Each structure stands twice: as C-alpha cells, then as structure tokens.
C-alpha cells in the first residue's frame, strides 16, 4: 500500500508505526528528558505545507500526540506547535525554543518575507511568557 501523506489516517498510522519501531522506542527510553520538536513541511501532510493545508488542526493534534504532549497542555490550544522548554540544574539552565514557521505561513513564494514576521511573532510570544 502506498503512503499518502495527505490522508489523516495514513499520517497517524505512519507516526504510530514509527513510535513502535525498536530503534526509536529504545532511543526514547534512554533519554533523561522527553522528546520535543516542531514539524517540518512533510509533517503537515504536503510538501511545504502552510496555513492552507486541509485539516491542519487535526494534523497538529496528530503531531502533538506523537510527541506525547499532555492533553491539557496549552500547546494544544495554540495557533501552531511552537513551544519553549527549560532544562538542566538551576545553575546551568538552558532554554530550547521550537518555532513553528508553517502553521500560519502563506503559500511559499521566493523570497518569503513572511518568515521573518512569523519568527518575530513566535519569539515575542515565547519571551513574554
């Protein structure tokens, strides 16, 4: 059966299959911290997906399910999958910022100046939190 990334069912099945792969499962189990991330273009189901992707809210939930983001996390209610995380001992904290430059992005046009605007908006929201 050919994988069709535009299908919500196929996207969910692919992520579930990957999570069950021994290599990934062993990797996750060996970590001291949870897996975090943001999506790349194909995680939305189409190449260079943006704000016009069908079912983008459901796709976001599938992605967050894959990362095992808590059902009550504010991240699930946001306009995108961006987040920030702080790790380490109090004396050496590190803040990791995961941007989402796709969720509200217009269809790509080269050059895409909306990327800079999206980046500034994401950073200002994260640093004000």
Image (spheres, rainbow, N blue to C red):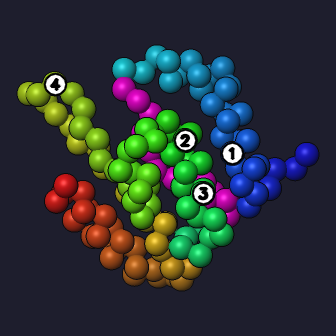
Gap in angstroms between the C-alphas marked 2 and 4? 28 Å
What secondary structure is the stretch in magenta mostly built from? loop
Q: Earlier in the sequence, mark 1 or mark 4?
A: 1
Labels 1 & 3 near each other (Cβ < 8 A): no
Q: Secondary structure at mark 2?
A: helix
Please report the bounds of the magenta region as a residue range.
33-46
Residue at position x 66%, y 40% from top? 15
In the rendered image of this protein, does residue 56 appear above or below residue 26?
A: below
Mark on residue 58? 3
In the rendered image of this protein, does residue 113 appear above or below residue 99?
A: below
Q: Earlier in the sequence, mark 2 or mark 4?
A: 2
Gap in angstroms between the C-alphas marked 4 and 3? 36 Å
Gap in angstroms between the C-alphas marked 2 and 1? 9 Å
Residue at position x 59%, y 26% from top? 24
Q: Is residue 97 magenta?
A: no
Question: Which residue is the site of mark 4?
Answer: 89
Mark on residue 12? 1
Q: Is residue 94 left or right of residue 35?
A: left
Residue 117, image x, y percentages: 33, 76
Q: Which label sits in the foreground, 1 or 3? A: 3
Q: Earlier in the sequence, mark 2 or mark 1?
A: 1
Q: Is residue 98 visible?
A: no
Q: Is residue 75 left or right of residue 7?
A: left
Question: Which residue is the site of mark 2?
Answer: 65
State which quadrant residue 31 falls in: top left
Residue 121, image x, y percentages: 29, 70
Labels 2 & 1 near each other (Cβ < 8 A): yes
Q: Earlier in the sequence, mark 1 or mark 3?
A: 1
Q: Secondary structure at mark 4?
A: loop
């Amino acid at each position: 059966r050919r994988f069709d990334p535009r299908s919500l069912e196929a996207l969910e099945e692919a992520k579930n299959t990957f999570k069950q792969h021994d290599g990934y499962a062993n990797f996750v189990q060996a970590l001291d911290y949870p897996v975090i991330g943001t999506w790349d273009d194909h995680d939305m189901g189409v190449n260079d997906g943006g704000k016009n992707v069908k079912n983008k809210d459901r796709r976001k939930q599938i992605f967050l399910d894959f990362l095992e983001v808590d059902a009550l996390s504010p991240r699930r209610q946001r306009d995108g999958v961006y987040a920030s995380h702080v790790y380490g001992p109090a004396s050496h904290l590190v803040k990791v910022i995961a941007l989402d430059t796709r969720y509200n992005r217009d269809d790509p046009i080269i050059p895409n100046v909306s990327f800079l605007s999206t980046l500034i908006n994401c950073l200002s929201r994260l640093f004000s939190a």
